[in-house]
Image: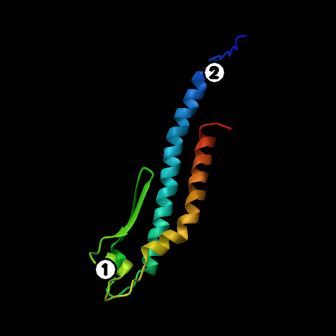
Amino acid sequence: MAVEIAITTEGVEGLQKALRSLDESMQRAVQEKLEKWAMEVREDAKALAPVRTGRLRGSIYAKTSGWTVEVGATAEYAIYVEFGTRHMQAQPFIRPAFEEHLPMLETAILDALNKAKEEAGLP
């Protein structure tokens, strides 16, 4: 006894168009949410950074590329402040900012995906 499966391709062009649109919308929506999230992390890191001259605080940056977020500081001594040395206690400012905002990242990405799905006209 044979098992038969029939697949019709009626309306497949519309589905393919919607999926392409979802991809573009999804990328754009996720990028926007990640940029906003990174700026919030950056602002918190700036608020947490110890200030003597303001150079460390002024060197804190955030950038996104695709689905990658980078928050850091360009001051050459930033790593020593963040992690400490054997002569100086750590005064973390970037890690606590990430930890504070990490729970919001999942929500931001899910919101972006739902927004993209709506823009693509998918249920």
Residue 97, percent from left and from top: 48, 72
Residue 53 percent across, percent down from the top left: 31, 86
Please tell me whether mark 2 sits on a helix, a strand or a loop.
Answer: loop
Residue 60 placement: quadrant: bottom left
Give the CA distance from mark 2 to mark 1. Answer: 59 Å
| Image vertical order of residue 55 relative to residue 7, above or below | below
Residue 66's tag is none
Instruction: Name the outermost residue toward the top.
Output: 1
**In this figure, which residue is indicated by the disc labeled 2?**
11
* Residue 100 placement, left or right of 89: right
Please give the name of the residue rendered at 41% of the width and 80% of the height, measured from the top-left corner: 49
Reading the chain from its start, which is encountered first: label 2 or label 1? Answer: 2
The disc placed on residue 55 is: 1
Residue at the image point whose x is 56% and y is 53% from the top? 109
Q: How many labels were placed on the picture?
A: 2
Compared across the picture, whether 7 is left or right of 69 comes to: right
Name of the residue lying farthest toward the left: 76
User: How far across and how far down the image is residue 30, in percent?
Assistant: 51, 50
- Dot 1: element: helix
In the image, is residue 54 above or below residue 36?
Answer: below
Furthest residue toward front: 1
Q: Amino acid at mark 2?
A: Gly
Amino acid type at image mark 1? Arg
In x, y percent, where is residue 85?
Answer: 32, 83
> Which residue is depicted at the point 56% across and 27% down?
16
Quadrant of the frame with the C terminus: top right
